[in-house]
Amino acid sequence: MLSGVLIIDKPYGVSSGEHIRKLKKIIGKEKIGHAGTLDPLATGILIVCLGQMTRFSDYLAAHSKTYEAEILFGNQTSTGDIEGEIIKSSSQIPKKDEITDILDSFIGDIYQTPPMYSSLKHKGKSLYKYARKGITLDIKPRKITINSIKYISLEDKTLKLNINCGKGTYIRVLAEDIAKKLGTVGTLGNLRRIESANFKIDEALNLDSINQKNIVKKIISPGDALNCLNKIQCAPEIIDKIIKGQKVEMKLTSEDRFFRLFDKNKNFKGIVENCEGHLKPKRLLTID
């Protein structure tokens, strides 16, 4: 059974789901999923989860991600990116100092309204399906976290930024909001995810380089795949209690909520939760 992750560099113009479905021809009946969707127009890191790692994908998706994003000033579109129809235009193009002065105002916990052209569900149906029928819904703003925004360059009408953010952030919406704050309009151009759950873009593989002969060597094992979480190594008697679903009293200096659990032989057992002086099982590997 294959279990672990593949770090794929998703190309332009294909959906995350469509791209990883190509792997089905190689892995056969194994479970497959991904941690953190990329829009078809976005490129970069797509974490593909195989086998038992599909049960841990939420922990990877929840970790911060870093993007290189281009904001094209002058037009706002119906979709928030260059594929949409132009709905508003402006001749106002901000200068570098104006841009750098306002970027800090977006850092921290902010509220963002998800776009209608997104896969977010409403009554079991993706929002973009409503949008394509011309149906507009009242979508409530959600709290997201922007850890950092770094200015890279401004050439003509194109602003390039490095953005590190938390789960659920729509860079398309952030691009529009930044433009609005600058007194103009803008839309998202190129978007590339260069880091996700501690994996960097130079570790990513081209899907075409993977085949039945080499796939096992390219899979990152579950314990290593979750390196965005700190690890804890426990004695056999503690491992035994946790596997049986019991809480174990243990005072930890770390304030982290979740840890990777390893036995004395460095075998990964799953994820445990730190609960006020106790460790309790959160999600463990299943035993075949």
Image: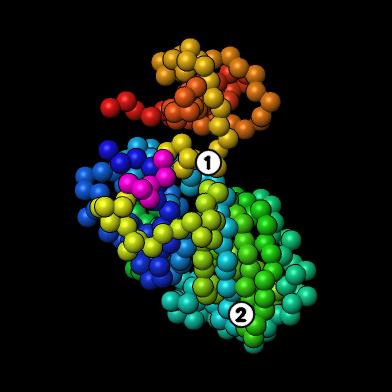
Question: Does residue 181 belong to the magenta stretch?
Answer: no
**Range of magenta residues:** 216-221
- Name the residue tied to disc 2: 158
Q: Earlier in the sequence, mark 2 or mark 1?
A: 2
Cα distance between the residues tagged 2 and 1: 35 Å
Q: Inspect this view and state whether residue 240 appears.
A: yes
For residue 227, the mark is 1
* Residue shown at the point (67%, 62%) measured from the top left: 149
The amino acid beneath tag 2 is: Thr
* Residue shown at the point (58%, 58%) measured from the top left: 66
Q: Residues within 10 Å of mark 2 (few under 14, many from 20)?
A: some
Q: Secondary structure at mark 2?
A: strand
Q: Secondary structure at mark 1?
A: loop
Indicate the position of residue 260 as horizontal and vertical percent values: 51, 32
- Left-right relation of 5 to 163: left
The amino acid beneath tag 1 is: Asn
Quadrant in the picture for residue 113: bottom right
